[in-house]
Image (cartoon, rainbow, N blue to C red):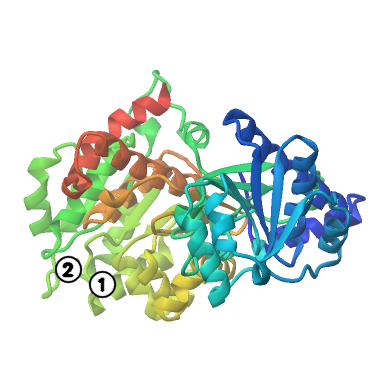
Amino acid sequence: MKILTKEQMLKSEERSAELGVSLKQLMDNAGFALFEQIKNYAYQNMITDCLVIVGSGNNGGDGLVAANLLNSSGISPTILLTGEVCSTLAKEAFNALDKNILVLHMNGCNYIKTVSEAEIIVDCVFGTGFHGEFSEEILSLFSAVSCSSAYKIACDLPSGVDCSNGFAAKGTVRFHKTVSFHAAKLGCLISPAREFCGEITVCDIGIPSAADSFFNISLFDDKAAKGALPFRPENSHKGTFGRVSLIVGSDKYTGAAALSAGAALRCGVGLTQVITTKKVAKAISPSIPEVVFLPLEASIDGTISAHNAHRILKECEKSSCVLIGCGLGNTENTAELVCEIVKNAKGTLIIDADGINSICRNIDILKNTKAKVILTPHPAELSRLVGKSLEDTVRDRIGETVRFCNEFGVTVISKSRESFVYDGESAYIITRGNSALSKGGSGDTLAGIIASLAAQGVKPILASALGAYLLGRCAEELSTDLSKRGITASDILRTLPGVLSKIED
């Protein structure tokens, strides 16, 4: 599924006109696509009428075109105008309406009764340009729509959804279907907006492929996951599948080391090395006998001493991927250690959790590293990376991720209900997963999965996207039999091989 931001969609439409497909033709095509979706549902359910709620702009124009076509197909549309039709193209569509179509104005009718009697309601009010909150009058209208038992269809995206960041205004309606044109809109795939869209159907409206001249955003689905899994020849040995070094854990956080190492093992890497304190190595080695340990002296605070940096770097030369951060601790000593590793590591370097916290104080170090860096921030960590408040970061999480990647030349997997991965050229949205992952240890498990895949030669962006997909799918599989409340990261580890088998098959 192709996904575009609001700005990209506007550029595609402008470029389409330059390439010979006018904005009027695009509106006609969008109206026809919307008509087809309404007609199919109406015919299947023997419904002969439809309410189309129309706004002042081109989203309303799409609805007006669809209404005219419905009228010619034996379905009686009623148009409810929320205000004056303003855009030039929408005015043309309004003037072309069949005279037999009933047109109502919100200010001059009992719109609550009209809404309550409709069997199909189509929202063509705001479209991609919406941001902010509803007026009291529109809030009242959509409150009535929400209470209606009608089948509800949104034109391009639900009114109230911010196309840029996935926020939804108070009073946004939960739709059964969203009919999106040319591409899915990014905001519709990000929570909380995602919850209001229902089934998303993307319809071609004739925009030439040459009009999309910007980085691609794709939904990372089952097909993408299968394609990203590294080939596994039978004529092989442990060296065939790479070596990963995990610089993880501290005397206070032993579990993070165990989870990240266990995840790496279960995703197919040939050799897993855990570099940690002696206390951590002693605590977790009985549970993961397949791991090679490099136990090191701890500093007075129980974290891996920065004095070990040279020895660690020497040991990591044997590995194609290094992970640093899970359970490492957030101290001055840790910051010194992480900075030494970032400056001198080669190959692929994944910086997670306290590794991220450590570089926030010296962020320009990313511009001088020799490694291909993957960062795995949750929203609070991303806010520290970009130097903004959590509220501002969350409001524009995708934009902040893109700007950060472009400035520092890194791959970032921005973790949340939906994860977003970007590397400066292309991007993925991963929608798999559920609230079972809202527990300590999920991030450590994800980091270990990504490290394992990267060590096997998977490109950083694909390793990150596939890692998030696998984590989410494990949570979904477990949730078919178990309560999300009781699922742990350890359960995810046990489920990983089964999920991988299903993808391979």
Dividing the picture into quadrants, the one containing residue 296 is bottom left
Residue 371 can be seen, yes or no: no
**Amino acid of disc 2:** Thr
Query: Measured from the top left, where is residue 188 in percent x and y?
Result: 54, 55
**Amino acid of disc 1:** Thr
Query: Measured from the top left, where is residue 347 in percent x and y?
Result: 45, 52
Residue drawn at point x = 17 percent, y = 68 percent: 303
* SS at badge 2: loop
* SS at badge 1: helix
Query: Measured from the top left, where is residue 166 in percent x and y?
Result: 51, 62
Residue drawn at point x = 40 percent, y = 58 percent: 415
Q: Split into 4 quadrants, where in the image is the N terminus? A: top right
Q: Are marks 1 and 2 in contact (CB under 8 Å)?
A: yes
Asked whether 141 or 216 is in front, the reply is: 141
Using the numbered discs, state the Cα–Cα distance from disc 1 to disc 2 in whole angstroms: 7 Å
**What residue is pinned by disc 1?**
334
Residue drawn at point x = 82 percent, y = 45 percent: 208
Residue drawn at point x = 11 percent, y = 56 percent: 280
Residue 33 can be seen, yes or no: yes
Residue 248 is left or right of residue 4, and the answer is left
